[in-house]
Image (spheres, helix red, strand yellow):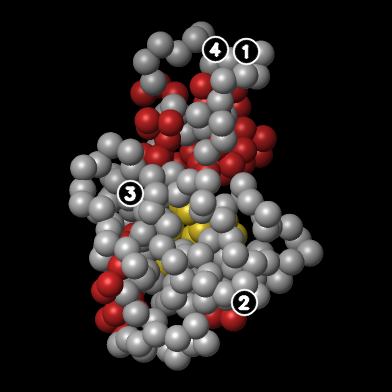
Amino acid sequence: MAFSLAADGTGGSASINASLYLLVKYYQMLPRIFVCKGDQGTTEFKLSSLIGMIPNFELSDAWDFGPLSESFKHCSYAYHTPYNLYALNTSLDPNLAVAADRNPWIMSPASALGTWADFRPDIAYPGGGTVGNSEQACRGNSITHQRDGQNVLFLDGRVAFEKRAYCGVDKDNIYTISRDLYRGDPYGIGVAPPGPACVTMNPKDSLLVHDADTISTSTTTKRR
């Protein structure tokens, strides 16, 4: 609830969106840049839509895309969880994912969660498990592009449209927690909703998350 900090700096805790909002606050990036046209239910953050704003309050005065009950509606992207032992820095592997379209295993305005049992990577991998077909593999993609893939920003600055979610280091799934202490994992462990236990397993594990839709009453995903 970083947006609701008191004047003396007390009373809030950072959200994922608050981390991204720093680009608005300090680099004058417009809030509309954080909205993907394919992400249904997500709209541009506008100060004029908030009730009870103090006079002359500017975008640079805020710390998030609105209060916690609203901020998830105004950002289409997931970000590598910064609140854990393996936060990103420029000395790490350049193929680590920094940000991408929303995580399919976390509730969002556009959709309820998918069913975890429907997802299977269509490759063999050291962690074991049944190899799936292309349809099962696409169930792990972001819903923003009809599960055809996701736009991914990597640590070296390149952006690519990846047709599989396991596009990180060692074919790591960018939306899940690796099951391996030392390498990436195409399957991994789902993260719904993100919270204190939502941390990366090792320095090669990308984990892109977004603030969950706290209003939707859709059915919770089955996990295993």
Mark 4 packing: few (<14 Cα in 10 Å), some, or many (20+)? Answer: few
Indicate which label's residue lies in the foreground, 4 or 1.
1
- Which residue is found at the position 48% from the left and 46% from the top? 195
* First in sequence: mark 2 vs mark 4: 4
The x, y position of residue 170, in whole percent, is 59, 81
Characterize the local packing of mark 1: few (<14), some (14-19) or many (20 or more) Cα atoms within 10 angstroms: few
The alpha-carbon separation of the residues under discs 2 and 4 comes to: 50 Å
Q: CA distance from mark 3 to mark 1?
A: 31 Å
Give the distance between the C-alpha atoms of the residues marked 3 and 4, in whole angstroms: 32 Å
- Disc 2 is placed on an element classified as loop
Q: 121 or 164, which lies in front?
A: 121
Image position of 50 with respect to 213: above or below: above
Query: Which quadrant of the view contains residue 25?
Result: top right
User: Which residue is labeled 2 in the image?
Assistant: 183
What kind of residue is marked 4? Asn
Q: What secondary structure is marked by label 3?
A: loop
Which residue lies under the disc numbered 4?
Answer: 56
The mark found on residue 7 in the picture is 1
Q: Position of residue 199 (x, y in %)?
A: 56, 56
**Between marks 1 and 2, how big is the CA–CA gap?**
44 Å
In the depicted view, which residue is nearer to us: 211 or 150? 211
Report the residue at 44% width, 27% height from top.
Answer: 67
- Tell me the amino acid under the disc marked 1: Ala
- The first of marks 4 and 1 along the sequence is 1
Alpha carbon distance from label 3 to label 2: 29 Å
SS under mark 1: loop
Amino acid type, label 2: Arg
Query: Which mark sits nearer the N-terminus, 3 or 4?
Result: 4
- 129 shown above or below 188: below
Q: On the image, numbered disc 3 is attached to which residue?
A: 108
- Give the CA distance from mark 4 to mark 1: 16 Å
Q: Residue at x 66, y 13 (%)?
A: 8
